[in-house]
Image (cartoon, grey):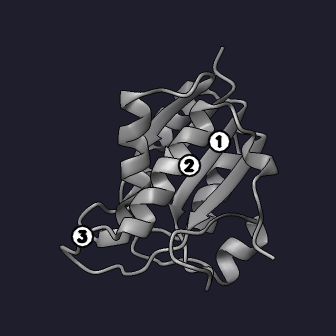
């Protein structure tokens, strides 16, 4: 039974902003039990029909987020904070608008940010962010509960 959907966001051509798409690739290669995955890329609004069609009980939204933490830090970010302070807005619509759209059909949405080092066009992903994404993948595969992960304080 699928308990949830991992919706990743990011642009793999923008260095560390490719954290979300890398997580989607890892989950497609080695799935986490109970989770399906959709890579929303740089325009996640274009896959909202697929999110709605999947009808998950919950969505785990993953993207790079400037939280002013050490490179590669992974934290849950409260919905109100998403709009106010943490976003690297390389996407067509702000993520708080995307979250509001998801909430129309999904009761439980958790946003997880990964602290980037650099977001530059045609930049390489930094080792710290790659390691964080690989760790996040391992945690999902191991069955860790995202709502118990550390939050931004």
Q: Is residue 109 left or right of residue 88?
A: right
For marks 1 and 2, the one nearer the N-term is: 1
> In the image, what residue occupies the spot 68% across and 64% down?
75
Q: Which residue is mark 2?
A: 136
**Measured Cα–Cα span from mark 3 to mark 2:** 19 Å
Question: Which of the two discs, 1 and 2, sits closer to the camera?
Answer: 2
Q: Which mark is residue 124?
A: 3
Answer whether labels 3 and 2 touch (C-beta < 8 Å). Answer: no
Q: Which residue is mark 1?
A: 59
- Find residue 143 and report its horizontal and vertical position in percent: 68, 31
Q: SS for tag 1?
A: strand
> In the image, what residue occupies the spot 38% across and 58% down?
43
**Measured Cα–Cα span from mark 1 to mark 2:** 15 Å
Q: Is residue 139 visible?
A: yes
Question: Residue reaching furthest left?
Answer: 122
Neighbour class for label 1 at 10 Å: few (<14), some, many (≥20)?
many
- Find residue 79 and report its horizontal and vertical position in percent: 75, 65
Q: How many numbered marks does the figure carry?
A: 3
């Amino acid at each position: 039974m699928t308990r949830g959907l991992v919706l990743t966001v990011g642009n793999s051509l923008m260095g560390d902003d490719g954290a979300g798409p890398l997580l989607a690739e890892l989950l497609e290669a080695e799935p986490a039990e109970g989770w399906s995955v959709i890579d929303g890329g740089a325009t996640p609004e274009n896959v909202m029909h697929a999110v709605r069609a999947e009808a998950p009980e919950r969505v785990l939204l993953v993207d790079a987020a400037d939280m002013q933490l050490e490179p590669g830090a992974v934290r849950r970010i409260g919905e109100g904070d998403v709009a106010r302070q943490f976003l690297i807005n390389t996407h067509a619509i702000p993520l708080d608008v995307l979250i509001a759209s998801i909430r129309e059909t999904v009761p439980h949405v958790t946003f997880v940010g990964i602290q980037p080092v650099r977001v530059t066009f045609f930049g390489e992903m930094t080792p710290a962010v790659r390691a964080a994404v690989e760790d996040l993948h391992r945690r999902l595969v191991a069955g860790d509960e995202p709502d118990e992960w550390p939050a931004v304080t």
